[in-house]
């Protein structure tokens, strides 16, 4: 069984007892989260597609940790002009364990 969930404007495929990394969510490690914007639920051959969401469906999970993604390096250079600029960025993520998918 899996579901497609809209979390903070992005769509994720979630399965029970698996974890995913999303953009940073408010909450401490161990806090419960609930996602009501379920777009699709598939259970074997039975598929429920929402228009735009599946009524009464929700996905519950638990925040495991607040982490940072790998560093992305932005390097700009213009040849023969002496212009070099280097910048880095690490996106903040939330690791969520999916506990239940219910209709």
Image (spheres, rainbow, N blue to C red):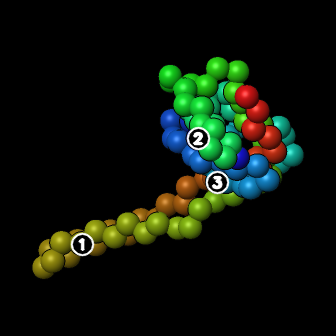
- Mark 2, secondary structure of its residue: strand
Q: Which residue is mark 1?
A: 77
Q: Residue furthest left?
A: 80
- Which mark lies nearer to you, 3 or 1? 3
Q: Residue furthest right?
A: 30
User: For this view, does 93 lie left or right of residue 86?
Assistant: right
C-alpha span from label 3 to label 2: 14 Å
Tell me the quarter of the picture where residue 48 sits.
top right
At 24% from the left and 72% from the top, the residue drawn is 77
C-alpha span from label 3 to label 1: 33 Å
**Label 1 environment density (alpha carbons within 10 Å; few <14, some 14–19, many ≥20):** few
- Mark 3, secondary structure of its residue: strand
Mark closest to the chain's N terminus, 2 or 1 = 2
Residue 17 vertical placement versus 45 (above, below): below
**Label 3 environment density (alpha carbons within 10 Å; few <14, some 14–19, many ≥20):** some
Indicate the position of residue 102 as horizontal and vertical percent values: 76, 33
Q: Check whether the beta carbons of the residues at disc 3 and disc 1 lie within 8 A of each other.
A: no
Q: Which residue is mark 3?
A: 21
Indicate the position of residue 64 as horizontal and vertical percent values: 80, 52
């Amino acid at each position: 069984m899996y579901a497609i969930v809209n979390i903070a404007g992005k769509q994720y495929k979630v399965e029970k007892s698996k974890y995913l990394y999303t953009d940073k969510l408010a909450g401490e490690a161990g806090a419960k989260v609930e996602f009501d914007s379920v777009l699709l639920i598939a259970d074997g051959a039975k598929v429920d597609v929402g228009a735009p969401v599946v009524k009464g469906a929700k996905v519950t999970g638990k925040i495991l940790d607040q982490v940072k993604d790998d560093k992305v390096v932005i390097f700009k250079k213009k040849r023969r002009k002496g212009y070099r600029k280097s910048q880095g960025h690490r996106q903040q993520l939330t690791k969520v364990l999916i506990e239940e998918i219910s209709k």
